[in-house]
Image (cartoon, rainbow, N blue to C red):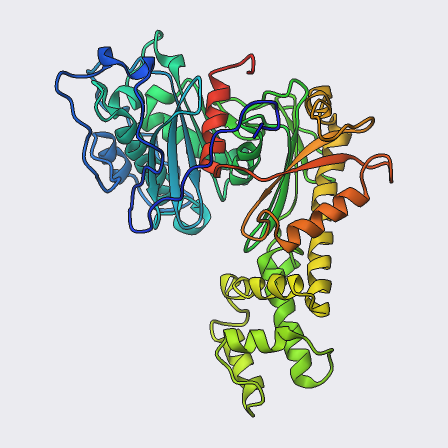
């Protein structure tokens, strides 16, 4: 299976075992020139399992910082280090979500999986867990993955994170993508904190939002195209890059960002370092977020309530919603119980609780329920609006570049003759391959393709790996300024 840029895709990683805190789902590592016997201690054996907590001297610096939000204390002094900097070429990627943080370490010149650490109950969204907790989750995930990657070699994680010299500084890179990174200020703050605690990675370190990791997971690290995420919420994010090899954008990259920002906020566009970035959607349930799990769940509740009142068409969603909530159809207290369920946590129901009803809609639509089909069609249109808004914002700022056209026009199964040809990376639980919403979104895209309505052409991409791999590929791009 060839990747979208003509490269052979790596095989999909097996899912991690459910009970482990830190997992290594890849096949047993095969020694390569980067891990030959010159790097191994005599009689070295792989290190045992650990819980991902930091045990090096940087832990004290991290834990001593105040957790008070809104105060920027002076960065800690770099931890004392007297070892030998690691000479291995390593690309490190971290994905920090709202409820978990995952790090993967890969080889620089291929997709050999060297190490992995998954902290399932420790999120890195500073908006929900606080800045210091988010920082610690990232640091611990990096430490755990490096312990895994370096087991059996003569190197320690400190030789990567703390070792600094001109000869080895360019041999490793770190990319961190986190939910809650909404601008350069957020990215710079996290990057500065990481540099203070891991100076060995300071030379090539990028911090970006999680949507960038989603895009990179479908383009093998090339930051050009559009990603649309549809889970509990939804957002579309895109990058159009003159030069096409920007691993970052409005994020803090090596401590520098372009001050020449495009102040035209149409499409929420910003131009940084020659790369035009835009996003649409992601406003949250109060703004409807059409195409999100919350949106579909709300529409399912609405359909059930209308049937209960006798003011809506019959739909299996009525019975399915009641069954999901363990309510009996026809009971005299159904309406009261529905309201009690919806408002038990306050004036508005919890986002995730409503989003959990979304699969009822997609399942009913797949089986032909007319009401559910209408909801899915509306959701697909909402996602299309986001994609097109991002496309137009980037188009006004410079487009996606001829390199994208050449890369896609060369694919044998489809030829394009005009317009931009854009990868559209589909992420999130509602956009699974062969899912009913995915199919409808594809139909919406095809109906608007260049040559029919004058709009752009796109190729839907389902990532083979998660956003932590997207981040690792972004890190590898930082080590390869001329592209691959």
Q: Is residue 107 left or right of residue 459?
A: left
Q: Is residue 264 visible?
A: no
Q: Is residue 13 visible?
A: yes
Q: Position of residue 386 (x, y in %)?
A: 70, 46
**Rendered residue at 32%/25% (across/down):** 198
Q: Residue furthest bottom?
A: 332
Task: Please identify the quadrant where the N terminus is shown.
Answer: top right
Asked where in the image residue 147 lies, by quadrant, the reply is top left
**Rendered residue at 33%/16% (across/down):** 32
Q: Position of residue 354 (x, y in %)?
A: 54, 66
Q: Is residue 202 left or right of residue 83?
A: right
**Rendered residue at 24%/35% (across/down):** 59
Q: Position of residue 355 (x, y in %)?
A: 54, 62
Q: Nearer the viewer, residue 37 or 108?
A: 37
Q: Compared to 322, does 394 lie above or below?
A: above
Asked where in the image residue 308 lies, by quadrant, the reply is bottom right
């Amino acid at each position: 299976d060839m990747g979208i840029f003509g490269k052979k895709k790596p095989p999909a990683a097996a899912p991690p075992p459910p009970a482990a805190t830190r997992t290594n789902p890849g096949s047993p590592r095969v020694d390569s020139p980067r891990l030959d016997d010159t790097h191994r201690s005599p009689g070295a054996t792989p290190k045992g399992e650990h819980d991902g907590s930091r045990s090096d001297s940087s832990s004290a610096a991290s834990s001593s910082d105040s957790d008070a939000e809104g105060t920027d204390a002076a960065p800690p002094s770099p931890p004392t280090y007297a070892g030998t900097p690691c000479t291995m070429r390593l690309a490190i990627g971290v994905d920090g979500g709202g409820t978990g943080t995952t790090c993967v370490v890969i080889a620089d010149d291929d997709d050999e999986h060297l190490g992995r650490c998954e902290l399932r109950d420790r999120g890195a969204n500073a908006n929900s867990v606080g800045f210091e907790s988010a920082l610690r989750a990232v640091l611990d995930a990096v430490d755990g993955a490096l312990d895994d990657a370096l087991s059996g070699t003569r190197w320690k994680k400190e030789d990567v994170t703390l070792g600094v010299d001109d000869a080895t500084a360019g041999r490793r890179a770190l990319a961190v993508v986190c939910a809650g990174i909404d601008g350069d200020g957020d990215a710079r703050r996290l990057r500065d904190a990481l540099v203070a605690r891991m100076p060995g990675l300071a030379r090539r370190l990028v911090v970006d939002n999680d949507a960038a990791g989603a895009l990179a997971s479908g383009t093998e690290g090339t930051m050009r195209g559009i990603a649309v995420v549809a889970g509990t919420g939804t957002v579309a994010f895109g990058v159009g890059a003159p030069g096409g090899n920007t691993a970052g954008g409005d994020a803090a990259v090596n401590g520098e960002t372009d001050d020449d920002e495009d102040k035209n906020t149409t499409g929420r566009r910003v131009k940084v370092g020659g790369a035009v970035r835009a996003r649409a959607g992601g406003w949250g349930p109060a703004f409807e977020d059409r195409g999100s799990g919350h949106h579909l769940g709300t529409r399912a509740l609405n359909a059930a309530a209308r049937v209960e009142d006798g003011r809506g068409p019959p739909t299996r969603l009525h019975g399915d919603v009641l069954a999901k909530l363990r309510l009996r159809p026809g009971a005299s207290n159904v309406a009261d119980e529905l309201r009690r369920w919806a408002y038990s946590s306050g004036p508005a129901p919890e986002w995730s609780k409503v989003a959990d009803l979304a699969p009822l809609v997609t399942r009913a639509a797949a089986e032909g329920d007319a009401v559910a089909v209408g909801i899915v069609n509306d959701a697909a249109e909402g996602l299309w609006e986001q994609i097109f808004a991002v496309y137009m914002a980037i188009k006004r700022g410079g487009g996606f570049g001829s390199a994208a056209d050449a890369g896609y026009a060369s694919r044998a199964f489809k030829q394009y003759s005009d317009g931009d040809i854009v990868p559209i990376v589909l992420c999130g639980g509602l956009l699974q391959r062969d899912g009913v919403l995915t199919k409808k979104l594809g139909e919406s895209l095809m109906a608007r393709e260049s040559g029919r309505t004058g709009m752009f052409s796109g190729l839907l991409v389902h990532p083979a790996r998660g956003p932590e791999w997207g981040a690792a590929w972004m890190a590898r791009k930082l080590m390869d300024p001329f592209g691959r």
